[in-house]
Amino acid sequence: MAMQQTTIKPLAPYVRAIKPASGGLAGGIGFTLLLAAAGYGLAQLPGLHYAGQMACAILLAVIYRQIWGYPQTLRAGIAFSGKTLLRLAIILYGLKLNVLQVFQDGPSMLVRDFAAAVFAIGCTMLLAKWLKADLKLSLLLGIGTAICGAAAIAAVSPILRSKEEDTAVSVGLIALTGTLFAIGYTLLRPVLALTELQYGVWSGTSLHEIAHVALAAAPAGEDALAAALLAKLGRVFLLVPLSLVLIMAQRRIARRTAAAGGEPEPGASAGKLQLPWFLLGFAAMSALGSSAAGQSFLQAAPSVMNGITVVTTFLLTMAMVGLGLNVDLRSSGKAVAKPLAAMLIASVMLAAGTYFTV
């Protein structure tokens, strides 16, 4: 009996520690689910439907943080939504990318997308240096502008070892800016000297998110929408090669820092090249969706793809809530102004440049 007491007694502190953690995990996930659902509800209202559920949800999360603070007891679940669910959503997002369609129907468009992406990132960074803005936050905004908005920012943030607050701010700014641009495109369309096809290509090459592209191109007709989505898919395709470039750049920086005798950033490594597992999942799901079997199944059961899209968007919305709760406007408000200015100017220049080349 004495032996049993000595065996069990040391476990007591661990049991007490596990219960709050597990409760915080479930409660935190439930909390992000609740705010995500509220964001979805807001996005159904007139006017707010232009912004979309992700933008509405992250706005609610940021407001909650400023008024009531960060819910520390739910930290485990909130972190799970902001990291694990985010990566799961990116993997599922890969099904949206049909690689074969990009290569078969739009090789010249892929070249155009590559040029637009390089221009967007390069212009944002040059403007950020000129404005003396935060370069890491500016790079996130530049990548979001160049590739596919929130999904791209979420994908590269771990590679760049960005703070969760910077990631959340970048996602919110991209969502808001892209929505305003998409509305502006629809208002300008009747007075632009562009055919439906040209307008679709312009929208897909220059707007931030797939949702923004669809919002701007749909009023111009099915041909414009198809061209716009194809152009946008070409930019989404660039996510994996861009991630590889960033990983190699981070390795080079780490080696130089080590050679100079400096302290590397937390998580930096000059060792073996490693692609984040969720990007490998993204590539695998893209390959699956692009295969003959995958295409046959998705075409035979469109409701399945629609369901996956809804789940992906909602998981991404929950992740945005998790990130938004890390935003403290009192400490980050001033730091955001200059990167935002750089991104806005770069977005306008991208829109103008692609307009005159379609």
Image (cartoon, rainbow, N blue to C red):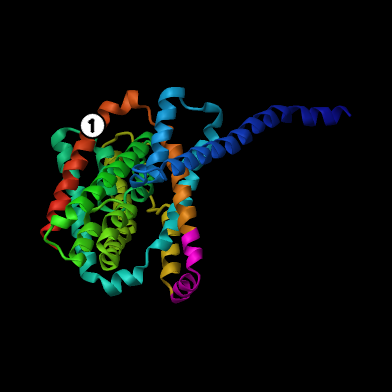
Quadrant for the N terminus in the image = top right
Residue 18: image quadrant is top right
The part of the chain drawn in magenta is 292-307
Q: Which residue appears farthest toward the right when viewing the image?
A: 1
Q: Residue at x 13, y 52 (%)?
A: 352
Q: Is residue 72 magenta?
A: no
> Which of 102 and 184 lies nearest the eye of the viewer?
184
> Which of 57 and 124 lies nearest the eye of the viewer?
57
Query: Whole-percent x and y of residue 339?
Result: 23, 36
Residue type at mark 1 is: Ala
Query: Whole-percent x and y of residue 110?
Result: 24, 65
Helix, strand or loop for disc 1: helix
> In the shown orientation, is residue 49 left or right of residue 118?
right
Q: Residue at x 19, y 44 (%)?
A: 124
Instruction: Count every numbered label the image shows and give the total.
Output: 1
> In the shown orientation, is residue 327 left or right of residue 73?
left
Q: Is residue 306 magenta?
A: yes
> In the shown orientation, is residue 34 left or right of residue 358?
right
> Which of 82 and 36 lies nearest the eye of the viewer?
36
Vertical placement of residue 45 versus 350, above or below: above
> Which of 53 and 338 lies nearest the eye of the viewer?
53
Quadrant for the C terminus in the image = bottom left
Query: Whole-percent x and y of residue 310?
Result: 47, 54
**Residue 253 seen:** no
**Residue 180 seen:** yes
Query: Whole-percent x and y of residue 234?
Result: 28, 63
> In the shown orientation, is residue 247 left or right of residue 293?
left
Majority secondary structure in the magenta region: helix
Local crowd at mark 1 within 10 Å, few (<14), some, or many (≥20)?
A: few
The residue tagged 1 is 337
Vertical placement of residue 271 versus 82, above or below: below
Residue 240: image quadrant is bottom left
